[in-house]
């Protein structure tokens, strides 16, 4: 009886699965279904995940209504409305791979946009390749994705994290050439380690005379930084580098300020920009902040920037932070590629003067582009975004490059202002194609052999 | 040898799964794949639970198995599925044999916390090793099975095939063991260690053996997961992962070797659909499921099937 029960259940399950598979009929495209993966729970949800989700919803709403400024004024993507399926990125890479398969194979999405965690991006990229599904990585920073492998179906519409460290060093040396002693406090996980290693290597290459005194590596989500703050105070640095973010950054700032750590040492916050919006007034004057690109306060004024600020504020009531800009970049990059693919098709498909099969050819030319055509158009594209022009220049045309900027904070009339903003061109802060980030830094930022 | 019903059922399920694989939707196949990998780990948890022990640190062996498989792929450049799983089993077996010397002396909460401590030590070590990708981990890709090169779909089927075969083989072997003299000691130890000692059996040796068996099963599960997922990171030995194994073990019950496999499948299915239908509250769905099972089915999901048996 026991076996009978098990067997019967099993046969029923198989039959049900078989039926559900045949029921998935292909019908004519009436919308573009995009799976959007972002942190909805866990420590990264507050500063990154939820702003990205809010931005995605606001952007999709506005694009579907055809309210975005040129060149994105057409409705949805290529005239088809966007349908958004949002899932949580929490739970680690193993679960994300399973959920990615579910998105693609069960929910049948056309395109996946998402992933903030570098581990998730690294894990999902080969699966995207296996399933042959166009996937746009949203906000992860690790340069390893396109430096260690090459992908056909995976794109990243934001620059990788190497430029954060390189530009931070340049900004620091431009503004304080006399700096002698540098310390760091970074979380002990991949991003924190990479961030510090890049910064340390850049300092050693650009100005070997600078002493690297102490590198504090509290664990991720530590919350208590008493010992690290003591170590930093006793090492008497001129400058403290930090890639802390979210709750860790806030806790560190709140605990370090009463101990006057920042009276003598200038703080460099590589990813400090979202923090400006969260706790204005708690960030000491003279702090060097970056936004991992020309995002947020560094975004040059343009109709696209005003549009993003307007739609985001309409939903969240806050200024968009850099994950919101990354989200805009991913959707607009995709839209630009899709619509370029449409134009390419029409431009190349109609046989001039050919009388035969004109109707069929026209229909083919005006049908929505398939995935291969979108990918061909996506590679090496240059598109406008709220943070400026984005060029898909690295990773065989799959990895975006952009300039970046750093600035110094000043607290004025109840708001944090960022002044003395300096912009750095993409070529100055990003390695060339085919060279890994650390090798490039150690080579003295060589652009060609 | 007299075949019991469980053995026959294992055979039937193995054949049915392998036969069904070409017609299964791809998502169902990957769901089954992940469930079976978890199921293998929970098989080991079941053995420990029968012996009266709960490990809050089985992520240690799950992760170690995966990293052993990753090492075979990345450092030794031998991306063979069978070799990767074998490496996972051997490495976890050795580590468990050593740690077992200490752990077999402890019971209850002390055993649970010590095992948790060891798993977090591995987590700490992995997070600090930049060469292994720290928290980002690294990708692995099994390219052959017993030396036969695999491409595209063949790789997916091979991954599924080896997972099905190894999981059911593990279930078969464990079932056989549980029916042996030594295997039956498990419940006796849980109920009264003193009596077992008076009977002339060594409690410590049995617990040590069960600890090693459960670790090897976790290692196999981890290596299989690494092969199927293609990416490994230290999250695999972080405490919530170990907690998940305990969760599935309690959800399943310890009545039969089918319980962990079925429990893992139920767990993964609920989780996957909860991700899809309530992305903001999927954790709550799992929590409520757990509450319902604990209140109404204290013997786990398996008691649903067992209850029907005539007394």
Image: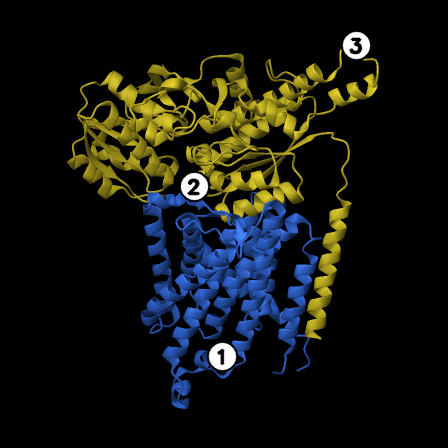
Kindly identify the residue that appears in the image at 70 percent across and 30 percent down: A31
* For residue A97, above or below residue B302: above
Give the colour of chain B: blue
| C-alpha separation, residue under disc 1 versus residue under disc 2 | 44 Å
Q: Chain of mark 1?
A: B
Chain in yellow, by letter, is: A
* Mark 2 secondary-structure assignment: loop
Q: Characterize the local packing of mark 3: few (<14), some (14-19) or many (20 or more) Cα atoms within 10 angstroms.
A: few
Nearest the viewer among B129 and B103 is B129
| x then y, percent, for residue A157 | 51, 26
Mark closest to the chain's N terminus, 2 or 3: 2
| x then y, percent, for residue B309 | 67, 78
* For residue A145, above or below residue B79: above
In which quadrant of the rendered view does residue A420 lie?
top left
Q: Characterize the local packing of mark 2: few (<14), some (14-19) or many (20 or more) Cα atoms within 10 angstroms.
A: some
Residue labelled with disc 1: B183
Label ID, residue A43: 2
Residue labelled with disc 3: A353
| x then y, percent, for residue A79 | 70, 21
* For residue B121, above or below residue A276: below
| C-alpha separation, residue under disc 3 versus residue under disc 1 | 83 Å
């Amino acid at each position: 009886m026991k076996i009978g029960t098990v067997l019967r259940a099993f046969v029923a399950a198989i039959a049900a699965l078989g039926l559900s598979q045949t029921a998935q009929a292909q019908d004519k495209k009436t919308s573009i279904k995009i799976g959007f993966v972002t942190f909805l729970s866990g420590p990264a949800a507050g500063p990154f995940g939820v702003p990205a989700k809010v931005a995605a919803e606001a952007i999709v709403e506005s694009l579907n209504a055809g309210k975005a400024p040129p060149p994105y004024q057409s409705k949805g993507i290529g005239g088809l409305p966007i349908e958004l399926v949002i899932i949580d990125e929490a739970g680690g890479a193993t679960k994300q791979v399973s959920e990615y398969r579910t998105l693609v194979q069960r929910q049948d999405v056309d395109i996946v946009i998402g992933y903030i965690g570098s581990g998730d991006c690294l894990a999902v990229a080969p699966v995207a390749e296996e399933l042959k599904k166009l996937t746009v990585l949203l906000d992860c920073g690790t340069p390893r994705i396109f430096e260690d492998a090459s992908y056909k179906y995976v794109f990243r519409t934001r620059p990788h994290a190497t430029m954060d460290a390189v530009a931070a060093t340049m900004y620091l040396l431009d503004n304080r050439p006399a700096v002698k002693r540098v310390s760091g406090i970074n979380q002990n996980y991949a991003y924190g380690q990479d961030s510090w290693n890049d910064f340390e290597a850049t300092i050693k290459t650009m100005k070997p005379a600078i002493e690297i005194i102490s590198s504090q590596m509290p664990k991720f989500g530590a919350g208590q930084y008493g010992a690290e703050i003591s170590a930093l105070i006793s090492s008497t640095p001129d400058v403290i580098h930090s890639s802390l973010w979210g709750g860790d950054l806030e806790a560190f700032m709140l605990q370090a300020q009463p101990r006057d750590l920042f009276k003598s040492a200038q703080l460099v916050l590589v990813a400090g920009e979202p923090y400006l919006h969260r706790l204005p007034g708690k960030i000491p004057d003279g702090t060097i902040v970056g936004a991992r690109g020309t995002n947020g306060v560094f975004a040059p004024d343009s109709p696209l920037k005003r549009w993003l600020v307007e739609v985001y504020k309409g939903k969240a009531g806050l200024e968009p932070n850099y994950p919101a800009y990354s989200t805009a970049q991913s959707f607009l990059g995709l839209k630009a590629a899709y619509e370029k693919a449409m134009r390419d098709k029409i431009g190349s498909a109609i046989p001039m003067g050919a009388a035969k099969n004109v109707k069929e050819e026209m229909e083919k030319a005006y049908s929505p582009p398939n995935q291969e055509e979108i990918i061909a158009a996506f590679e090496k594209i240059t598109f406008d975004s709220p943070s400026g022009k984005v060029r898909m220049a690295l990773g065989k045309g799959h990895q975006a490059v952009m300039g970046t900027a750093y600035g110094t904070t000043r607290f004025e009339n109840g708001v944090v202002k960022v002044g003395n903003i300096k912009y750095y061109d993409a070529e100055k802060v990003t390695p060339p194609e085919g060279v890994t980030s650390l090798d490039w830094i150690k080579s003295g930022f060589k652009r060609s052999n | 040898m007299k075949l019991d019903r469980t053995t026959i059922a294992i055979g039937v399920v193995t054949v049915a799964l392998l036969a069904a694989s070409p017609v299964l939707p791809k998502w169902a196949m990957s769901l089954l794949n992940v469930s079976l990998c978890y199921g293998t780990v929970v098989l080991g948890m079941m053995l420990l639970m029968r012996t009266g022990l709960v490990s809050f640190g089985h992520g240690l062996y799950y992760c170690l198995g995966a990293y052993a498989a990753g090492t075979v792929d990345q450092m030794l450049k031998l991306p063979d599925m069978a070799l990767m799983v074998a490496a996972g089993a051997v490495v976890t077996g050795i580590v468990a044999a050593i740690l077992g010397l200490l752990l077999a002396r402890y019971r209850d909460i002390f055993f649970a916390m010590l095992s948790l401590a060891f798993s977090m030590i591995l987590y700490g070590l992995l997070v600090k090793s930049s060469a292994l990708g720290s928290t980002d981990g690294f990708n692995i890709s099994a390219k052959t099975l017993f030396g036969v090169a695999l491409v595209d779909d063949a790789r997916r089927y091979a991954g599924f095939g080896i997972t099905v075969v190894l999981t059911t083989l593990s279930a078969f072997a464990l079932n056989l063991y549980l029916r042996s003299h030594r295997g039956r000691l498990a419940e006796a130890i849980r109920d009264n260690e003193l009596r077992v000692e008076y009977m002339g059996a060594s409690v410590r040796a049995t617990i040590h053996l069960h600890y090693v068996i459960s670790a090897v099963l976790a290692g196999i599960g981890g290596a299989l997961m690494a092969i199927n997922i293609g990416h490994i990171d230290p999250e695999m030995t972080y405490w919530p992962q170990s907690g998940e194994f305990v969760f599935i073990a309690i959800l399943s019950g310890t009545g039969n070797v089918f319980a962990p496999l079925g429990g893992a499948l139920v767990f993964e299915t609920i989780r996957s659909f909860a991700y899809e239908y309530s992305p903001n509250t999927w954790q709550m769905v799992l929590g409520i499921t757990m509450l319902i099972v604990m209140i109404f089915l204290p013997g786990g999901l398996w008691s649903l099937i067992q209850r029907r048996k005539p007394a």
